[in-house]
Amino acid sequence: MASAEVIRERGVPVGKTLISFDHAMESLSTDDRFKATVYAMNSLLIAKGVYSQEEFQFQFRQFAQKQSR
């Protein structure tokens, strides 16, 4: 009897699973895919120490202020 291989993904609680990347792409609107991309990239860059949460927020606030002029 073959058993199914279980691959643990970092950050996913035991007993929980994530949908596949293809399923995620198909289920999201273009706008939500863009938001998910920005979220993922910022999360990775912060986790890898490329920049801090504070640096991100500073840049975000600068952009928002420039847009409101």
Image (cartoon, helix red, strand yellow):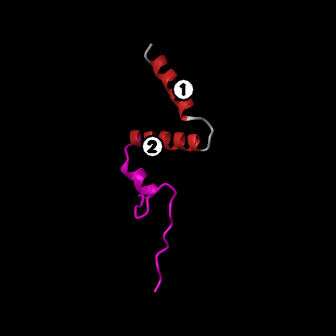
Rendered view: 32 above or below 7? above
* Type of the residue with mark 1: Gln
- What is the x, y in percent for residue 20? 44, 58
- Image point 40% across, 39% down: which residue? 31
Q: Residue at x 38, y 47 (%)?
A: 28
Along the polypeptide, which appears first: circle 2 or circle 1? 2
- Label 2 element class: helix
Q: Position of residue 1 (x, y in %)?
A: 46, 86
Residue that carries the numbered disc 2 in the rendered image: 36
Please tell me whether the stretch drawn in magenta is mainly helix, strand or loop: loop
Q: Which of 3/22 is in front?
A: 3
Cα separation, mark 2 vs mark 1, equals 19 Å
The answer to whether residue 2 is left or right of residue 45 is left
- What's the residue type where badge 2 is placed? Ala
Q: Nearer the viewer, mark 2 or mark 1?
A: 1
Residue at the disc numbered 1: 59
Q: Is residue 4 magenta?
A: yes
Which quadrant would residue 32 be assigned to in this image?
top left
Residue stretch in magenta: 1-30
- Relative image position of residue 10 (x, y in whole percent): 52, 57
Question: Taking 38 as reference, is 57 above or below it?
Answer: above
- Residue under the image location 51 percent in, 21 percent down: 62
Q: In this picture, is 8 found above or below 21?
A: below
Q: What is the residue that sits farthest to the bottom in this orientation?
A: 1
